[in-house]
Image: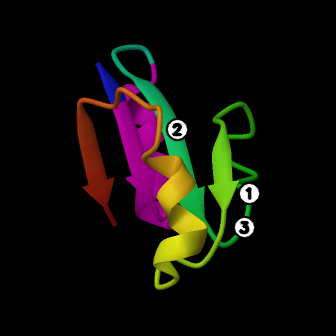
């Protein structure tokens, strides 16, 4: 299952990714790249800017999005 995690560089987002990375394929959306999950493809943008974050959802087939 593919999962998009907003807040992927934060404490909870990075723990979620690291804990479940054997079972899921992750991508991230955050204002900074995570040092805790450097191999996760991450769109760097402000989640309050719809135009900036919309590419994270275009052409993707995530089956779940986790807002943290």
Counting residues from the N terminus, which is met first, the one under dot 2 or under dot 1? 2
Label 3 environment density (alpha carbons within 10 Å; few <14, some 14–19, many ≥20): some
Q: Residues within 10 Å of mark 2 (few under 14, many from 20)?
A: many
Dot 1, how many residues are within 10 Å of its Cα: few (below 14), some (14-19), or many (20+)?
many
The residue singled out by tag 3 in the image is: 32
Disc 3 to disc 1: CB gap under 8 Å? yes
Taking the spot 52% from the left edge, 38% from the top edge, the residue there is 27
Q: Quadrant of residue 33?
A: bottom right
Q: Is residue 66 visible?
A: yes
Q: At which x and y percent is residue 37?
A: 65, 41
Instruction: Residue at 45% x, 24% y: name it.
Output: 21
Q: What residue range appears in magenta?
A: 3-21
- Give above or below for 51 relative to 55: below
Q: CA distance from mark 3 to mark 2?
A: 13 Å
Q: Quadrant of the N terminus?
A: top left
With 47 as the anchor, is 31 left or right in this view?
A: right
Q: Label 2: which residue?
A: 27
Earlier in the chain: of badge 3 and badge 2, it is 2
User: Judging from the image, what secondary structure is the residue with disc 2 in?
Assistant: strand
Q: Is residue 10 visible?
A: no
Identity of the residue drawn at 60% across and 70% down? 52
Residue 38, image x, y percentages: 75, 39
Q: CA distance from mark 3 to mark 1?
A: 4 Å
Q: Nearer the viewer, residue 7 or 59?
A: 59
**Marks 2/1: CA distance?**
11 Å
Q: Nearer the viewer, residue 13 or 32?
A: 32
Residue 33 disc label: 1
Image vertical order of residue 37 relative to residue 34, above or below: above
Q: Which mark is residue 22?
A: none
Q: Are marks 2 and 1 in contact (CB under 8 Å)?
A: no
Q: Is residue 29 above or below residue 68?
A: above
């Amino acid at each position: 299952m593919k999962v998009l995690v907003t807040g992927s560089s934060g404490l909870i987002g990075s723990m979620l990714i690291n804990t479940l990375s054997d079972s899921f394929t992750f991508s991230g959306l955050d204002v900074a790249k995570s040092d805790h999950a450097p191999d996760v493809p991450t769109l760097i943008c402000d989640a309050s800017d719809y135009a900036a974050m919309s590419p994270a959802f275009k052409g993707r087939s995530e089956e779940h999005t986790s807002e943290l």
